[in-house]
Amino acid sequence: LNPVLSVNRNFSAPVNVRMEQSLDDRIFLLANDSDGFNRYEAGQAIATNMILSLMKDYRAGKTMSLDSKYVEAYGKLLADESIDPSFKAYCLSLPPEMVLHGEQTLLDVEATHVARKFVRKTLAEAHKAKLFEIYRKMNKGGEYKIDSLSMGERALKNTALGMIMTLASSEAYELCERQYNSATNMTDESAALTCMADSEHPKREESLQKFYNKWKHEPLVMQKWLSFQATSSRKDTLEVVKKLEKDPVFDKTVPNFVRSLIAAFARNAIHFHAEDGSGYAFVGQWIYELDGFNPQIAAGLSKIWSDYKRLPEKQQAHMKRELEKIKAKPGLSKGTFEIVSKTLA
């Protein structure tokens, strides 16, 4: 067998190395490397390249499929019990959409979202039994502990739950609902509710309302509740956010509430970059209004336009309209004006 190079082993600081490595070599490292970070890096590189390739298939109308060797290597990673639970949770996660956007010259938000979702669901379907096994093993119950091992076990359990919920099965929904109702800590409670908020779970609305009734007098917790819904990929997310901005719990004069709802929605790429421009119009109007009484928050939120020049022509035109509307606002603050002007330029 030919040797496979695992570089920078045991390094304590990040080092960027550009090197050509075949898919087979990366898959081998993902399944077998004894250096945890290199194993993680191999998995991230494989997933990134595969998602970018699947995006092309999606746009070409081709049937998407996942390399069987990668699916097998992911299974070996799942089965490896020598890995620290916390680190294993990182290794099992796919690159975030924001990271995948950074690899694109011309931003294709929809294809990125669809391809990443396909990979996640395909892996969950292939390793369903193992994911349920990991969940049961990590779901120890009992006294809530904040030592590193317990925190890692919760992270791995909730990573497994997130993967399981992509299956959208009654079994997955029951598991998530059970965790939500029996949770003894905010980590487990919010993890379950985040999954439910991003799903078609039949108890979704009921659970969100239950959380609201329980925590509505705790501003920090309510900010989480707003974010759960603002970051959902569901088709009705913008309509939901527009309702939430009128909820008594939301206070537009408090920066953290604005960040939890409006800024969280602005980071929700699939909805912010909606092809009809509705996401831009919504966030643009908020920046316009916020600049009048909190210019610092308005300027900070204006950084969300940074992908302007990388957008397809139609979306760029929608975004340009909102940018010009903000720029023309009488009395626009210096900070917001500077960011918007530089974006347009």
Image (cartoon, rainbow, N blue to C red):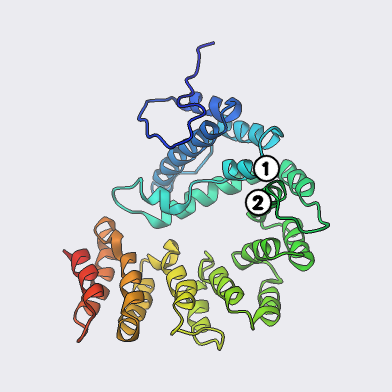
| Residue 52 picture location, percent across and down | 41, 43
Say which residue appears at 39% left-offset and 44% top-offset: 56
Spatial distance from mark 2 to mark 1, Cα to Cα? Answer: 7 Å
| Residue 186 picture location, percent across and down | 68, 65
Name the side, left or right, on which 34 lies relative to 184.
left
**Eyeballing the image, is 10 above or below 203?**
above
Say which residue appears at 74% left-offset and 44% top-offset: 134
Q: Quadrant of the N terminus?
A: top right
Three-letter residue code for mark 2: Ala
Q: Nearer the viewer, residue 96 or 13?
A: 13
N-term-proximal mark, 2 vs 1: 1
Residue 126 — which label? none
Element type where label 1 sits in the image: helix
Residue lying furthest top in this view? Answer: 1
| Residue 100 picture location, percent across and down | 41, 48
Q: Nearer the viewer, residue 134 or 203?
A: 134
Three-letter residue code for mark 1: Pro
Residue 155 — which label? 2
Would you identify the image quadrant in which residue 144 lies?
A: bottom right
**Eyeballing the image, is 191 above or below 202?**
above
Would you identify the image quadrant in which residue 198 lies?
A: bottom right
Q: Are marks 2 and 1 in contact (CB under 8 Å)?
A: yes
Would you identify the image quadrant in which residue 319 lies?
A: bottom left
Q: Residues within 10 Å of mark 1 (few under 14, many from 20)?
A: many
Say which residue appears at 37% left-offset and 25% top-offset: 20
Element type where label 2 sits in the image: helix
Say which residue appears at 72% left-offset and 34% top-offset: 81
**Eyeballing the image, is 283 above or below 60?**
below
| Residue 103 picture location, percent across and down | 35, 45
Residue 85 — which label? 1
